[in-house]
Image (spheres, coloured by chain):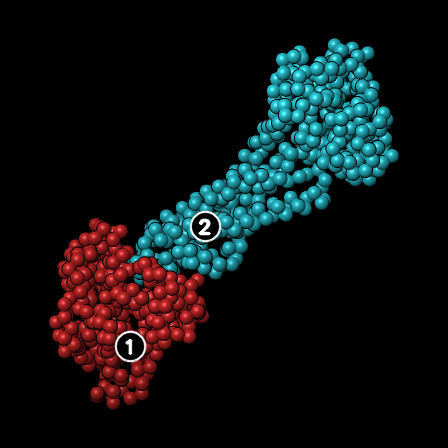
Chain colours: A cyan, B red
Amino acid sequence: MLQLAQRNLFQSKARLLISVGGVGLALMLMLALDAIFSGSEQQLTAYIDNAGADVFVAQSGVYNLHMSASWLPASVVTQVQAVAGVQAVSPIMYLTEMIEVRGERNAAYIIGLPPNATLGKPWRIATGVALPPKGGTVIDQGLAKKYGLNLGDTVKVLGLELKIVGLSEGTSSITNSIAFIAMSDFAQARSVLASTTSGAGMTGMSGSGSGGAAKLVSFVLVQVVPGQSPAAVASRIEAQVSGVTAQSKTAFAAGESKLVRDMAGDVLAIMNTIGFAVGLAVLALTVYIATFARRAEYGALKALGAGNGYLYGVVLTQALISVAMGLGLGLGFTLLLAFLLPLFSSNMALVVSGQSLLTTTLTALVIAILAAILPVIQIAGLDPATVIRRRVQ
Amino acid sequence: MSAIVDTRIDGRTEATVAAPATLQVSNVSKRYGAGETEVIAVNNVSLTVAPGEVVLIMGPSGSGKTTLLLMLGALLKPTTGTITLNGEVISALKENRLPNIRLRHFGFVFQDFNLLAALTAQENVAIVATLAGMKNGAARQKASTLLGELGLGQRLDFLPEKLSGGEKQRVALARALVNDPMLIFADEPTANLDSKTGHETMRLLQHIAKEQGRSVVIVSHDQRIKDIADRVLWLEDGQFKDMVEMPVDPVCAMPVERGKAIEAQWNGKPYYFCAQGCRDEFMTEPARFAAK
Ligand SMILES: Nc1ncnc2c1ncn2[C@@H]1O[C@H](COP(=O)(O)OP(=O)(O)OP(=O)(O)O)[C@@H](O)[C@H]1O
Ligand SMILES: [Mg+2]
């Protein structure tokens, strides 16, 4: 059965190429798109994962970093420090804003760091320093490369002309990069922001007054005492400090990933459906044609005493081999793409997750089974007598 | 001038009929369609095929030959009547039992060979043996032995497309034989072969019957097959006609079917020929041939 299926498949090279190629491309569509979103997910949580913090303390009700604004009175920092199980704290200021280079605006997370920051600073530096002094900024290496920027060049962040003092790695995603600036610049810029932009950046600051700039931070990053559970420390912080939401790094990152998945969910579902349909159509057609072309042979086999089950097996095996090869091809191309893409574009990362591989494999299996249905019906209805009558031609 | 030809070849028929019957057909009819479009393709036919017997079924086109062969080979159920194989009524068996009967007891040879194009000669034969449960290695061994006996020892690894028509038919023959069937059915086995390879195939079929004791049932228009047949049955309008009146080609002396033969008039009388060549030859010296 396997032998016949295999020989039938490989005898018609063009047909094999079409079915394997078609199925491969369809599966690649599914794999690659999922990989892009998985990559974005990783990129989006890159800051949370690498900030060095075990717990993130935000304004009450703020659960995400992306597209959110969190403002806390600076006094919270000392309150958090006092909670049992907390080893070290470091505040940051944060806004989703723009880096302007030669009049072009690039979306960015702007992180304001205190001069002595131990947590939340860039984790990998290509050149320069990690901690920006007043008037300086650390931007993503990929962004710098895109504009041919070097240390000493200036970019506009939050309306301030800042000199590049360092280039960081791993700090860009498909949608934005991260720029680190001094907290004092950030605080100063808030008033600039207040006068040029309306709403968004300001909402969290309402009621704090213009003079209270230095008295506000966005998040308090917490390192727990070794051996302490971040989740337990987070609940303790929420219990003892009023007006805050504290989450362990894992919970915070999970919430962030969910954001991507929620956004990507529909797109993925649509693309998966398209991939499924394309793969199914190509395979069903080629398997059907392959069976149709050999119906005289199958009829002869039936006359010679082959049971329907055997012939179904041959057709299904053919579909399964095609799909397995298509899956290999699709996966190969996706991995190749994942390898090649970073060489050409710095802010897109493809990550083939085990989950996605499993889903795609199952989808491929379903495609193979569905594709075999029509030919199986065809074989079921094939009367061996027609072979002898020469009505099959 | 026409001759009465007894289609029974006497002595041999008697000899084989004495042996225990293997395939018995009793009052079998086959009706296609119903009402206006009803066709009675085979009408109340009875027949016994003995072991080692070569039965040739001839008859005009549409007379029901293929229909009868399909019923004998358990590929088509009779509308009425019974077919028994060694006492077992196979015409009453459930559809799902028939493949196994065909696999183990029958071998088929088709006009179009119908070899599996993707498999080599050896694999084409071996696959049918594995269908019957033989292990792969043993099946290949048996296939190569059989093909060797049929003179295809040098062609084991050839794909069908690389084989001549006669070679293909021999592979098909090996395939039909691989499970040691009691009966071989062949519908027009020589129709797609030139006369030399057609003759070879006939000899092989005869050998299979005589040396191996298998029954061979052939449907054909090929007059030459008569030479190897123990019995020639003439089917017309779905019924056997014991005797048949057949004109004889005045040039080569071959009996020919009136409807199919090439006709010529000479001296106000019709003459029938097996081929254009005979007719042309006749016309060169009609008087000499007509006198024969
Ligand atoms: N499946 C079918 N449905 C309806 N009628 C059929 C079917 N098969 C055969 N017939 C009819 O039954 C009759 C006998 O057909 P059959 O094929 O058995 O003849 P045959 O003797 O083999 O003819 P030929 O010499 O041309 O092969 C014909 O009239 C044919 O048209
Ligand atoms: Mg016929």
Residue linked to disc 2: A319
Please give the chain letter of the residue carrying mark 1.
B
| Image coordinates for residue A101, horizontal then vertical, percent | 81, 32
> Looking at the image, which is closer to me, A48 or B173?
A48
Q: Is residue A146 left or right of residue A328?
A: right
Q: Which mark is residue B15?
A: none
Labels 2 and 1 share a subunit: no
Visible residue check, residue A83: yes
Q: Residue at x 42, y 50 (%)?
A: A316
Location of residue B148 with respect to A14 vertically, above or below: below
Residue linked to disc 1: B203
Q: Residue at x 69, y 26 (%)?
A: A53
| Image coordinates for residue B157, horizontal then vertical, percent | 44, 69
Q: Amino acid at mark 2?
A: Ala
How far is the residue under mark 2 from the one under mark 1? 43 Å
| Image coordinates for residue A239, horizontal then vertical, percent | 63, 13
- Disc 2 and disc 1 in contact, CB within 8 angstroms: no
